Image (cartoon, rainbow, N blue to C red):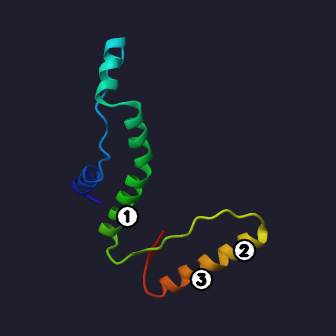
Amino acid sequence: MTDAQRTKLTQDHHLAPLKPIKLATPDQLQDALDDCTLDHWSSKTQALSSRFDAARHAALLLLKPNVMLVRIKKRTLNNEAELKAWLAEDEQLLADKLKIGAVAF
C-alpha cells in the first residue's frame, strides 16, 4: 500500500492522530472539557473499533479487490459440544465462500 493510500484511508475513516491537548492548569482542563465533554470522548472512543474495522476492510479491498468479507457470528459458548458445532458451522461457511474466491473475516 502506498503512503498516499494509507493517508487517504486514515483521513476517510477519521483515524488521524489527535492534536495535543493542554491540560497543565485547571483553566486549560476546563477549556478542553468545554471543547469536548467526557461523554463526547466516551462516544468517540467507542466508535474507534468500528472505524478501524472499516479502514481495515477498505485497505483489504484496495489490495485484493475481489475478496469477500465474511461475518462470523459472535456467540457465547457454554461447552465443548457448542464449540465443535460453532467451528463446524463456520468452517462450512468459509469453505463454501472459498470456492468462489478469497475471503476475509
Tags 2 and 1 touching, CB below 8 Å: no
Estimate the spatial distance between the alpha carbons at disc 2 and disc 1, rounded to whole Å: 28 Å
Q: Which of the 4 quarters of the picture holds residue 78?
A: bottom right
Of the two numbered discs 2 and 1 on the same chain, state the one appearing first in sequence.
1
Residue corresponding to mark 3: 92
* Residue drawn at x 31%, y 39% as measured from the top left: 17
User: Under tag 3, what secondary structure?
Assistant: helix
Residue type, numbered disc 1: His
| Residue 18 x %, y % | 31, 35
Q: Is residue 27 above or below residue 104?
A: above
Q: Is residue 90 above or below residue 38?
A: below
Residue 20 drawn at (x, y percent) = 31, 27
Q: Residue at x 36, y 66 (%)?
A: 60
Residue nearer the viewer, 1 or 80 = 80
Residue marked by disc 1: 57
Image quadrant for the N terminus?
A: bottom left
- Which label sits on residue 16? none
Location of residue 56 in the rendering, given as x and y in whole percent from the top left corner: 38, 59
Q: Cα distance, mark 3 to mark 1?
A: 22 Å
Q: Quadrant of residue 27?
A: top left
Q: What's the amino acid at mark 3?
A: Gln
Q: Secondary structure at mark 1?
A: helix
Give the residue drawn at x 23%, y 54%: 8
> Which residue is the site of mark 2?
84
Earlier along the polypeptide chain: callout 3 or callout 2? 2
